[in-house]
Amino acid sequence: MLENEKALLKQKYGHNKWLLAVHMLGKYIKDIYHAPRFHTKISMRGQNNRCPYVPRECTVKIIGDNNTVEIDPSVKIFKGEITVGDFYSPASNCRVYIGKNCTSNGTNIVLMEDGTTVSIGDDCMFSWGVDFFVTDFHTICARDTTEIINKGKELTVADHVWIAMHATILKNSYIAKNSIVGAYAVVAGKFTEENCVLAGNPARVVKRQVCWHREWPNRYRADSAGEYTQN
């Protein structure tokens, strides 16, 4: 118990141990039936898998060998799920990296193919319903040679990228830094030009030479004008 909590309890109950005991019992019961909504869950099956840190409200599921999920410790809230392999098709030698100060309101990252990689840069912001699919769930082959032509390899999001709600980022895509992906967009390709807005299905560049900030417009305007004061 922190010192300020002790001081508040003493101020409220004085030295009455019975009232203090009732208070602590009530708090215990409340914690049982109203558990904090923040959760972290890691499930790993296989050999040599690593996931040293997971932020709250994030779930990591790994089935396979030699996989790494590396999330920078500065990432405090990253709602969503990271899945590497499944029971019917384990995946091995995969890597997920999420850089500094990223945030997510609901992101689903899926790797189902050996040797695939997801790399997310620093200070990225993802909305809810965002999907990263680093592999297709079924195979496409050349008719004559049976060679697989839809192999997954990597998916890269550079620094300071904002991905809006219900966007889908597909295998082997690249999004350059300082970019914005519009709501419900489907990114399937490499976009190397920085400071762009991508939108549509399939996504294309709809605006150039933009930048974005995490503040809501009203606050951003007030901050820019020097009018905002925090209460």
Image (tube, rainbow, N blue to C red):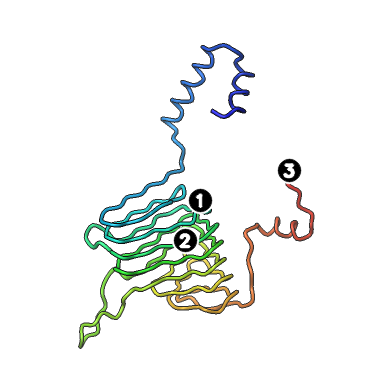
Place of residue 34 in the rendered image (x, y in percent of width and height, measured from the top left)? 45, 33
Quarter where residue 161 is shown? bottom right
Depth check: give the residue in front, 55 or 161. Answer: 55
Please, what is the three-letter code of the amino acid marked with disc 1?
A: Ile
Mark 1 or 2, nearer chain start? 1
Q: Secondary structure at mark 3?
A: loop
Q: Which residue is mark 1?
A: 77
Q: Secondary structure at mark 1?
A: strand
Task: Reply above or below: 56 against 144.
Answer: above
Q: Residue at x 37, y 47 (%)?
A: 41
Please, what is the three-letter code of the amino acid marked with disc 3?
A: Asn
Tell me the distance, in whole angstroms, between the alpha carbons under discs 1 and 3.
Answer: 24 Å
The label nearer to you, 3 versus 2, is 2
Mark 1 or 3, nearer chain start? 1
Q: Residue at x 45, y 30 (%)?
A: 31
Quarter where residue 227 is shown? bottom right
Place of residue 18 in the rendered image (x, y in percent of width and height, measured from the top left)? 51, 11
The quadrant the C terminus occupies is top right
Q: Is residue 31 left or right of residue 16?
A: left
Depth check: give the residue in front, 155 or 163. Answer: 155
Q: Which mark is residue 204?
A: none
Q: Residue at x 38, y 54 (%)?
A: 51
Q: Residue at x 34, y 58 (%)?
A: 83
The label nearer to you, 1 versus 3, is 1
Q: Which residue is mark 2?
A: 98
Q: Is residue 96 left or right of residue 195?
A: left
Number of residues whose C-alpha sits closer than 10 Å to that of mark 2, classed few (under 14), some (14–19) or many (20 or more)? many
Instruction: State yes or no: discs 3 and 2 in contact (Cβ < 8 Å).
Output: no
Number of residues whose C-alpha sits closer than 10 Å to that of mark 3, classed few (under 14), some (14–19) or many (20 or more)? few
Q: Which residue is mark 3?
A: 231
The label nearer to you, 1 versus 2, is 2
Please, what is the three-letter code of the amino acid marked with disc 2?
A: Ile
